[in-house]
Image (cartoon, helix red, strand yellow):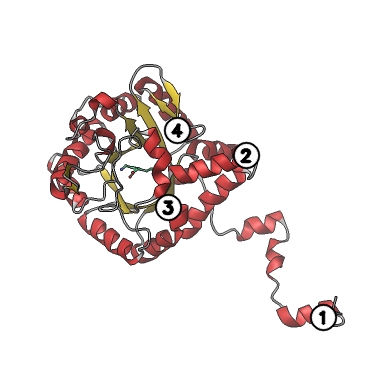
Amino acid sequence: MKSLPEPFSASIDKIVGHKRMRRNRKTDWSRRLVQENFITVDDLIWPLFITEGQSKVCPVPSMPNVHRYSVDKIVEQAEKAANLNIPVIALFPNTGPSKRDEKASNCVDENNLICQALRAIKSEKLPVGILCDVALDPYISHGHDGLMEGETILNDDTVALLCQQALIQAEAGADIIAPSDMMDGRVGAIRQTLDLNGFQSVQIMSYAAKYASAFYGPFRDAVGTNATLKGDKRTYQMDPANSDEALREVALDIHEGADMIMVKPGMPYLDILARLKETFKMPTFAYQVSGEYSMIMAASQNGWIEKERIMLESLLAFKRAGADGILTYFANESAEHLKNNT
Ligand code: PBG
């Protein structure tokens, strides 16, 4: 080993001068004092899956600790969210295979799973908002988010159907409509439909920058579209290679009337999140999607990582990048943690 200049600490002093970054990190109280970002329960949106039947709680194999609940059981989960002070739950249906067709007819049936769940939860008058996805995939036989003619996903015909879907969800009590389909013009069309029908105060959270990602795999198991999906979603969801394009997508959605915008997936797209927040200063959300959740769960089940620390670190990373909130399958667990540790 080469000899160090003497005395060594004097030479480090020369390099750092008065500036020692570690001073503020020295103690717990000091770290708390200088902490820039925080995760609180108010940042959380909890996605929940609904299934047909009575008294059903079925595990989703590719998403450990995540279940599909029948309508009677989903009410208990909504109560749990309210007790934990989680502001919003997001509902996703696993429509029975016999109810899926080429026209996604069930999406506009006011007795479909989503509307049943909305009415059941709303009748409890819980202090929790309900967000509903608007897209055709859980209702359509080929698993795409839009109507198909040959190989083509039809934009405008799909938008017309999405407007009706949004309307019956608003009628059943949805507080936030979240178009996740990536058709052009859908935010404006849905806004107009809601307004014309007296739902001016129903909010729109647009999946504005939604990428054609392989991270959605476990979600497609949960809603039962993996088995049926033909091809991929690259003619409507964004190319993971693009960043400027996300600015244009978001600008359009804001112009069309979105109240809040979302980036999806989450952690691999923090650069997009940061750019969008910096540029538009909108209420901006990140979706920590199923694949991100399942990777963390799988690694922790193998004993390779510490789940709780990674869960909290990943949520904090979204806040640091500029998110106002996060859709996460860890919402219940992190809310419980935050309740017990603050
Ligand atoms: C449906 C939809 C998807 C997700 C939310 N809404 C899947 C998709 O676009 O194929 C993904 C959520 C997740 O992976 O957790 N339009």
Q: Amino acid at mark 2?
A: Asn
Q: Which mark is residue 311?
A: none
Q: CA distance from mark 4 to mark 3?
A: 19 Å
> Counting residues from the N terminus, which is met first, the one under dot 2 or under dot 3?
2
* Relative image position of residue 242 (x, y in whole percent): 35, 63
Residue 48 seen in this snapshot: yes
State if disc 3 and disc 1 touch (CB < 8 Å): no
Residue 88 seen in this snapshot: no
**Label 4 beta carbon within 8 A of ligand 1:** no
> Counting residues from the N terminus, which is met first, the one under dot 2 or under dot 1?
1
Q: What residue would you read off at disc 4?
A: 81
Q: Amino acid at mark 1?
A: Ala
The quarter of the image that holds ligand 1 is: top left
Crowd around label 3: few <14 · some 14–19 · many ≥20 (10 Å): many
Most foreground residue, 265 or 73: 265
> Counting residues from the N terminus, which is met first, the one under dot 1 or under dot 3?
1
Taking the view exactly as shown, the residue that stands out farthest to the top is 54
Q: CA distance from mark 1 to mark 3?
A: 45 Å
* Quadrant holding the C terminus: top right
> Counting residues from the N terminus, which is met first, the one under dot 4 or under dot 3?
4
Give residue 139's quadrant in the image: top left
- Disc number lying in front (2 or 4): 2
Q: What residue would you read off at disc 3?
A: 324
Q: Amino acid at mark 3?
A: Asp
* Relative image position of residue 273 (x, y in whole percent): 41, 59
Q: CA distance from mark 2 to mark 4?
A: 29 Å
99, above or below 249, in the image: above
Q: What residue would you read off at disc 1?
A: 10
Give residue 49's quadrant in the image: top left
> Counting residues from the N terminus, which is met first, the one under dot 4 or under dot 1?
1
* Relative image position of residue 119 (x, y in whole percent): 28, 26
